Image: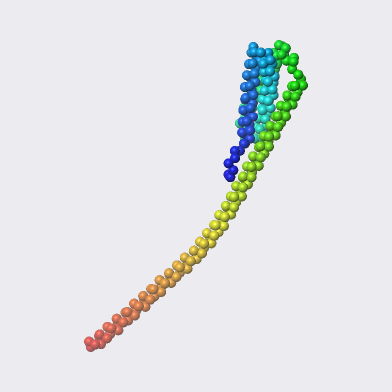
Amino acid sequence: MRGSQPVVTISEVFQSYEEDYKQLIQQLRSLATVVEGTGPTQERCNAGQEMVDAHERATQAFQQMEFEVKSMGSLGAALVGKLKEYKQELLASRTLVRNVQARLNREGLLRGASPDDKVQRDSAQRMRAGARRLEDSRRTALEAESIGMDVMSELTDQRDALKRSKDHLHDVDGHLGTSKMFLSLMSRRIQTSQAMVWCLAIVLFIILVFLIYLKLQKLMAFFR
């Protein structure tokens, strides 16, 4: 691949929401300890309100995890069991929040809370959650587009390389055909040259035998 930029996959998005969820659940339990303690009244009241916020944010994180698992298709099957555990944990946390609110209500610590403040806080949280989902979706889309462009570029390069290899093979095949033709021609010439040499040798041998025969005839005539 050409680019060396980090790629955030769907599973990593799930892990991001999972980390947020675990932190919020841990924060909720810590706040419950503060509410059930003997600290200052205002601190306990604030902790109770923060517990409600933490539970709502944990619920949103859990919903995002469910969405990511569904979008992963068959790859998300391994996370179904984990989601069931988180859902049971979330239900237990909701029960804990209700018990804490009931305790604060019995002690008269929730009477001063303003409904308008809670509505505004809930609206702001929903807006932040929506903005975060949009940002995550935009980031995933941009990264998917970048991956697609890289894949297309790689495929184009591979296609060009295959085309060059094909042309090179055609050239090699042509050179091999030419070389084969030259070798065949040279082989025929060598065979022709060998045949001529043998013919010449036979002719010379016949001439030599004839000359020896003539010499012998002259010698025999001389001695007579």
The residue at the point 63 percent across, 47 percent down is 152
Q: Quadrant of residue 10?
A: top right
Provide residue 48's location: percent of width, then percent of height: 68, 17
Say which of 190 and 106 sits in front. 106
Q: How many marks?
A: 0
Say which of 184 and 64 sits in front. 64
Relative vertical location of residue 14 with respect to residue 222 in this rendering, above or below: above
The residue at the point 62 percent across, 45 percent down is 150
Q: Is residue 100 visible?
A: no
Q: Which residue occupies the extreme left position in the image? A: 223
**As drawn, is 219 to the left or to the right of 39?**
left
- Coloring applied to the structure: rainbow
Q: Quadrant of residue 25?
A: top right
Q: Is residue 209 visible?
A: yes
Relative vertical location of residue 101 with respect to residue 15 in this rendering, above or below: above
Q: Quadrant of residue 143?
A: top right
Relative vertical location of residue 3 with respect to residue 118 in this rendering, above or below: below
**As drawn, is 224 to the left or to the right of 168?**
left
Say which of 82 and 43 sits in front. 43
Name the image quarter holding the N terminus.
Answer: top right
Name the image quarter holding the C terminus.
Answer: bottom left
Q: Which residue occupies the extreme right position in the image? A: 116
Provide residue 156's location: percent of width, then percent of height: 61, 50
Provide residue 61's location: percent of width, then percent of height: 67, 28
The residue at the point 76 percent across, 20 percent down is 115
Relative vertical location of residue 104 with respect to residue 162 in this rendering, above or below: above
Provide residue 106's location: percent of width, then percent of height: 72, 11
The residue at the point 69 percent across, 22 percent down is 53
